[in-house]
Image: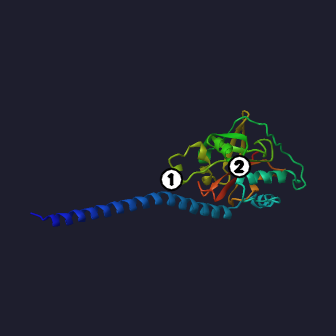
Amino acid sequence: MKSKWNIQIENETKLKRTKTIISVVLAVSGLIIIASQSIPLLKSYIDGVITQTREDVKVNPVSEEYKTYIENEFAFYDPGKNYFENLAHELVLGASSSSKGSAKHYVIDTSYSKPMYITISSIEINHILITPNVESTNADVYNSYLKKGIAHFKGTPIPGDGGNSFLYGHSAVESFFSSHKNYPETIFSKLSNIEIGDIVEIEKDGSTLKYVVRTKKIVEADDFSVLDQNANKESITMMTCWPLGIGTKRLVVYAERKS
């Protein structure tokens, strides 16, 4: 028969072994959880760098012209304010200054409230709601609309009214988006796959407005070029956070109205 001393030693050995196994399991589980989040984020960032590099070397017939007219003369960034508060401030400054000496050929209709819808067939965005004239300086307000789809930034033209209409939406990390690909709140995650020349359709007042993608770029979070207007072009600028779901930068897609 085993002595009490031997039994006690065996029990202590089993207890230590059990604790070791539990510690290893917990450590491995923690590493798996961390990897499941960090790997998609890293992949998203790397994909963004690769995408931007590809866009930089593409032949874009309007890229130089676009770079010229998006030069921001009025940029002022207040780190004490959120991104959209700074955009609103920039919008006021831009409106109070001359539009590069050109007459404005667009309308700012802040009373428009009819729902619009956006479709980009090439990246499987289909009939997603655009809420017009969203008050974008209040996060609680614009987030309530982004749960339903895309927001139009109040103070920029409504699509179809000339000028540059600014549309924005949330994005999500790949681990979430992969199983929620048609979730309206994060549908603009698909903008990462858009290509130069793709067609964007906006349904408004029973008509379909068509735009062709001219520029796709990643910009710093304090870049206000999304608001710039060109009196001779009708366009939309679409924006979401980059890397997807993180938001240290912005993914911006610019499209011009087709005749």
* Quarter residue 114 falls in: top right
Relative to 31, 185 lies left or right: right
Relative to 136, 184 lies left or right: left
For label 2, the SS is strand
Q: CA distance from mark 1 to mark 2?
A: 30 Å
Q: Which residue is mark 1?
A: 175
Question: x and y percent of residue 35 in the render?
Answer: 47, 60
For label 1, the SS is helix
Q: Dot 2, crowdedness within 10 Å: few (<14), some or many (≥20)?
A: some
Q: Amino acid at mark 1?
A: Ser
Task: Name the residue: 24% across, 64% down.
Answer: 12
Spot the residue most to the top. Answer: 206
Question: x and y percent of residue 199 in the render?
Answer: 67, 47
**Does 114 appear above or below 94?**
above
- Towards the viewer: 105 or 84: 84
Q: Amino acid at mark 2?
A: Val
**Does 195 appear above or below 49?**
above
Residue 169 visible from this viewpoint = yes
Relative to 257, 18 lies left or right: left
Q: State the quadrant of the C terminus.
A: top right
Q: Dot 1, crowdedness within 10 Å: few (<14), some or many (≥20)?
A: some
Question: x and y percent of residue 26 in the render?
Answer: 38, 59
